[in-house]
Amino acid sequence: MIDLVAEAQSRRRRAFPVLIFEDEHALREAPAQADELYELIRSADCIPLECEIVKTRTGHPKFLMGSGNAERIAQLAQECEADCIVFDTSLSPSQQRNWERLAKCAVIDREELILDIFASRARSREAVLQVELARAQFMLPRLTGAWGHLSRQHGGGAITRGEGEAQIEVDRRLLRQRIRQLRGELEELTRQRGTQRKARRRRPVSQGAIVGYTNVGKSSLLRALTGAEVLVKDQLFATLDPSSRRMAELPDVVLSDTVGFVRRLPHALIEAFKSTLEEAAQSDFLLLVLDISSPQLDMEFETTLGVLKELGAEEKNIQIVFNKCDLIDPESDAVKLARLRSLFPDAVYISTRRGDGLDELRSRIGALSSGSRRTMHVLLPPSRHDLAALAHRCGEVYEETYTPDGGVEMRFAIIGKYQHKYMEFEV
């Protein structure tokens, strides 16, 4: 009997994936999106069942689809003995409750699935706090209805008799208090990280960040370039905490690994992980890594650029790096390679597994670092406060003094692509 209980407890959950499309153009991406959803489900330690694709013309407020399709999916999930239904889209709190009443099983959306994966990967204190904050923000609007059967009757007189404070209000208050506490703790860790970053900035080193879609080989590249013993694993979101290491051949260059991006990364996670993702925003240059063997290469590139734009890092010096070149055939993939070389003439093609192209990449990093950062002392006239704003946005300001005529004298460090803007104003 004990063995049966242990076996039941260790049984992996079976997830029934559902994709919803509203137009024919989006429907063409169904196979690739289904593959990514399968990977997300496996990363959450669940077994993905056969994916169900639903085409609907307009959004339906109750189930995101017509009631007929909803009942059919609920029936299929029951026949497959699914433990949960996973939607590759966002569900409102009311839609999630409607589905759970209909399907009689757990129902989660893409955002909750990614949050669960992040929770299982978090190891450091900062990552744990970041994930807990994101999950608390996600759960806050979903408390409605969770305690509908419980309410406290606090007696009043004959006139004031009525329902007192409901359990949901108690939970909301406690959850808001916890959110404020988490934000405070993360702000303190962010200040500590900023102090560490300033200490690094005082040294004559150039900062680079490795960014890209999840599972493209960022940690493998950091290990290949620096010899760092960082976690390298073929799974989504294997890295949540940034690792900074000096390059062996270029000791004046420090590279940082970052959390991987993904299509429709939940906004709550971007907000929660901003202190971690600041490594990209504060770096002098970026190595944008792409998986050249991926069938969704264009989408992954656009997703990465979108997240960098949200972080304010899209104006950095960016070196495109195509990884996993050992997984393609130069002859059968000749058209694809020609297209990429035309679109990205300055890209570097590497294989971290075989070591191909790493020497060329080191050379490019050396060129980026040598002219990437320069300390400037300028006197800007009153008409060029736009340059003062640019220095704050894309550089690091050490001193700033306003002159009687409305100008500004500044001493700051800024990356190479902007240095020419200040040449005529140097003191």
Image (cartoon, rainbow, N blue to C red):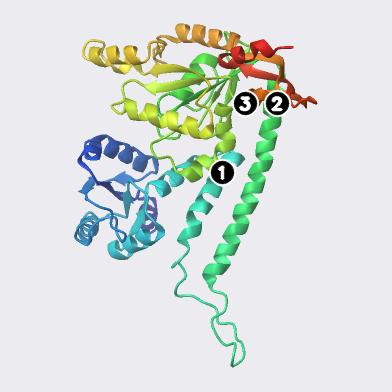
Name the residue that disc number 3 marks. 386
Please state the horizontal and vertical placement of residue 6, each as a whole percent of the image: 39, 54
Q: Which of pointers 1 and 2 indicates the residue nearer the eye?
A: 2
Q: Which of pointers 3 and 1 indicates the residue nearer the eye?
A: 3
- Residue type, mark 1 in image: Gln
Name the residue that disc number 1 marks. 130
- Residue type, mark 2 in image: Lys
Tags 3 and 1 in contact by the CB under 8 Å rule? no
Measured in 3D between alpha carbons, the distance from the residue under mark 1 to the one under mark 2, in whole angstroms, is 22 Å
Tell me: residue 3, above or below residue 197: below
Query: From this viewpoint, is residue 204 visible?
Result: no
Q: Nearer the viewer, residue 307 or 416?
A: 416
Please state the horizontal and vertical placement of residue 70, each as a whole percent of the image: 24, 58
- Residue 198 bears which disc, if any? 2
Residue at 22%, 10% (x, y): give it: 331
Location of residue 203 by image quarter: top right
Tell me: residue 8, above or below residue 275: below
- First in sequence, mark 3 or 1: give its number: 1
